[in-house]
Image: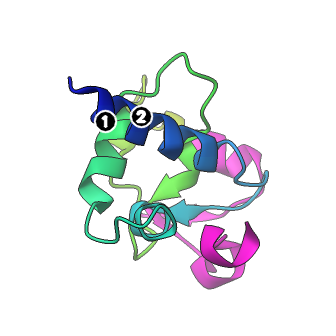
Amino acid sequence: MKAETLSFFEKVYEVARQIPYGRVTSYGAIAKYLGAARSARIVGYAMNGSGGKDVPAHRVVNRKGLLTGKHHFDGTNLMQQLLESEGIVVKDNQIQNFNGVFWDPGKEL
């Protein structure tokens, strides 16, 4: 991987580490905050590769609140279980009250 890709991934991890307990954000919100609004998919790749880096990847979902990255977690429902352990209600892979638990790094950081 190119050095600039790795540094972008590290920037993504730094933002993700600041997502508060019991809140979620989206791939696109992180990308926009980092000045790369069209790079939501790259943020997803970063989350997929974040294992072992102390990154709360379970708190990053798609723009509609769907757990689209759940197949990258060990176990069938680990992403959902982690979210639910923080008080977030998930039904049919969809975060309930998404707007209420959404954390926007552009407004919060």
11 with respect to 108 (left or right): left
Magenta-colored span: 81-109
Say if the magenta span includes residue 24: no
> Could you tell me which residue is drawn at 45 percent across and 59 percent down?
61
Residue 83 percent coordinates (x, y): 64, 49
Between residue 34 and residue 81, name the one nearer to us: 34
Residue 56 percent coordinates (x, y): 61, 38
40 with respect to 63 (left or right): left
Residue 49 percent coordinates (x, y): 36, 27
Give the residue pinned by disc 1.
Answer: 4
Which secondary structure lies at badge 2? Answer: helix
Q: Are marks 1 and 2 in contact (CB under 8 Å)?
A: yes
Q: Residues within 10 Å of mark 1 (few under 14, many from 20)?
A: few
Give the label on residue 7, or none.
2
Which secondary structure lies at badge 1? Answer: helix
Between residue 106 and residue 3, name the one nearer to us: 3
Between residue 23 and residue 107, name the one nearer to us: 107
- Under mark 2, the amino acid is Ser
